[in-house]
Amino acid sequence: MNPILQVKNLTVAFDKVVVKDVCFSVYPGQTTAIVGESGSGKTVTSMAVMGLLPPSGRIISGEITGVNRLDYIKNGSPVGTEISMVFQDPMSSLNPSMRVGSQVGESLRVHLGLNAREATQKVIELFTEVELPSPRETLNKYPHELSGGQKQRVMIAMALACEPSVLVADEPTTALDVTVQATILNLLQKLQKERNLGVLFISHDLEVVRSIAQHVIVMRFGEIVEQGLCLDVLDSPSHPYTIELINSRPKKICEGGVRSHQSLIEVKNLGLEFTTSRNFWGNPTKRFKAVDDVSFIINTGERVGIVGESGCGKSTLGLLMLGLEKPSKGEVVWKNKVLNVEDEKSMKEFRREAQPVFQDPFSALNPRMKIGKAICEAIRQTVEGKKLSSSQQLQEAKSLLLEVGLQEEDLEKFPSSFSGGMRQRIVLARALAVKPIFLILDESVAALDLRIQSQILELLSEIQKNRSLAYLFISHDLDVIRAVCDRVLVMKDGRIIEEGSTDEVFNSPVDSYTKHLLESRPGKLNFAS
Amino acid sequence: MRFILKRLLQGLGVLLGTLTLVFFIFSFVPDPARELAGQTERESVVQAFRHKHGLDQPIHSRYISFISNAVQGDLGSSYITDRPVMESIKDALPATLILASVAMFFATLFGIAIGLVLALFPNSKMGDLVLSICALGMSAPSFVVAILVAWLFGYVLHSYTQLPMTGGMIIVDPFEGPRLAWAHLILPAFTLGIRPLAVIIQLSRNSAIEVLSQPYIRTAKAKGLSRSRILFRHVLRNSLNPVLTATSGWFASMLAGAVFVEFVFGWKGMGLLMFNALERGDLPIVMGCTLVISTIFVLVNVGVDILYGILDPRVERL
């Protein structure tokens, strides 16, 4: 079979070389996947193919050829017609002030010269093809009126509008919920088959790749470490890095620390409502229940997970439990005492003992403060810490850094010299500095590469065991929850719909939604094809 | 529609509040009748003046009659010229409207255009130069600029420009009666427009640079659209919001009269009218101007809220 896109010895440089000597081909009706972690050069490669490199980047050498031996580098990539692209984040990839119908129609009018009526007609056909509900009404909607999955369908319709032969999909489902991810991947496969489309699929997720790709390229530091037929590479990897990648999916990390049956934090009928619409006099007419009558208990030393899709209220619940958001009803009981947000003294004590770790380690650290200083600042928040001399504080900070797997020398560095995973370790060390007994981990590993993710999860379990901490792990990722939690709560539309020990819930779910969630996991994808 | 109605009702409240406040502040000034009549005037003349303007009534009934007359379109008459306030405003308002609109229209048009072009070349020498000139234009006070402009274009370069240093919008010709003098508009409008122009250039440049880095612009590029199409269809509209915010507030305050500029150029607009009235303690004119200016502010703000909704469909109307 002749490739419809062939990349030979591609080298791309910004200040330094970021993609080196990359070769691959895309065939009609087949999917070539590039896998790698952040910084591996996979996105830069796709941008080079699309001719969309930022001005600071340039192609040093290599060839990119398309159908009929069209030279992409010399003639410019035929974007929008021969080759088109679907991006990772459908939320920000659509123009917020333009109706989605005209955004898709624009390509048709520009490239195929259709008039307004013909374009509209074609857009309706496309919307039907990507299975958008009520295509005719969707035409006149703005992006913010659509859900994430619907937006991605619009993106796909837009990419396919002028019937390209190659589709570049850069992490097209990473920003979506698992259940939505499965439907979008199914749709992509269906369209690929119907249109005999060559797909260049960029992803960090090996399970997704395994389920849809025929060819795979593993990239690291801008170079290809291994490539070949998808199943060959994934089932019998030869390069150690590929093996490490394959093994980095969260695995069950055994037992936690000492558990007791003493209640540490208890949530009683907790609820939070927002007003979404008001009448003429400003009185609320519609309310949205972000958290709806939730009750559960976490015991000392227990590891509890909350899992749910975006918008289910899991993060809001975390904020309520930390006292960062005032509940509209119900209460939080901390060590058998009702938590009163207005009582500053008891809140101060509570805030020391219950520490949050959030998703984004990049914005959680002050970029102008040395790591040592940031940790010492936290140490001084405790009664014992205040009494320590500054050298003793530094000593304490040092041991904390060692505990989270960093070096002594790192005390003197600024956050900018650390990667995402290392920063999350620092954030963790800072949270531990005040000797908490309870952590709320809100998507704490979601922004990290899988390999780093599993390292942080292991670290977390170790710390939990050594310090007998209790934690609440909030995540959308079922595998993460499974790896590090004893008990799991499944949330949907602000309510807890299933609760039980991790093994019970994962092995024999009772609720139909839980079953659906579990079946949508990438590893479990079953495609009709 | 309900949203607009609500904003208009709120505006009415603002209007009433402003009027009340100004009315009571001016009720503290010393007796205007005695002041205007002079120390030596007979008491009977002063009494007659008081009675004519209702100054012999207690303050609350004066307030009520002022409001009820205002609702019927009667704003009283000037203490000094006895001319109805409505007529003075009818003369002054169009002059200010035209001056401010022309100044703002060209400032916005050129401001956005130049800003967009600068956004395309964010690190160019030319861009830096234009931005420094903008900083200069922004920081120069309008009375200095007004005098400089009048002197330079109206006096030094008069033989080239043929523009007068000062003059209002309407010239009364002894034989042919009143006529419009458009040439008189150029210098004051230019002066008035300089600062908005400088600000709008900077705002629209920064805003467009921000928009250009958004993922949806990358999407537009991936669709294979031409640069100009991306600029006009995707960048322009999304970068207008901050410009609108700045422009609208400014426009409203310009409509209240650009006192310095009107003064220097002798442009007989709202600013000059109010300035003179304040100087002479002519309360009815001050009140009338306040009413008109507040109304303009309210209307401009409601208009801007509607525009926000059009520019950015995500704006919520709670």
Image (spheres, rainbow, N blue to C red):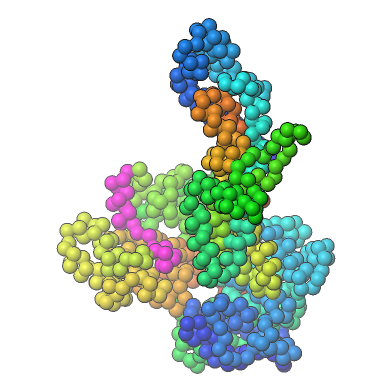
Count of numbered circles on the image: 0
If the image is split into quadrants, where does the N terminus of chain A sit?
A: bottom right
Find the residue positioned furthest to the front.
Answer: B159
Residue at 54% across, 56% down: B198
| Residue A451 x/y as whole percent | 44, 79
| Residue A473 x/y as whole percent | 42, 63
- The verdict on residue A486 being magenta is no
Residue at 36% across, 61% down: A439
A3 to B96, vertically: above or below: below
| Residue A80 x/y as whole percent | 71, 75
| Residue A46 x/y as whole percent | 60, 81
Q: Nearer the viewer, residue A55 or A173?
A: A55
B176 to A9, vertically: above or below: above
A81 to B88, vertically: above or below: below
If the image is split into quadrants, where does the C terminus of chain A sit?
A: bottom right
Q: Nearer the viewer, residue A475 or A6?
A: A6
- Residue B186 visible: no
- Residue A7 visible: yes
- The verdict on residue A362 being magenta is yes
The stretch in magenta equals A343-364
Residue at 41% across, 46% down: A331
Q: Which of B54 and A300 is in front in this view?
A: B54
Q: Quadrant of residue A340?
A: top left
Residue at 69% across, 78% down: A79
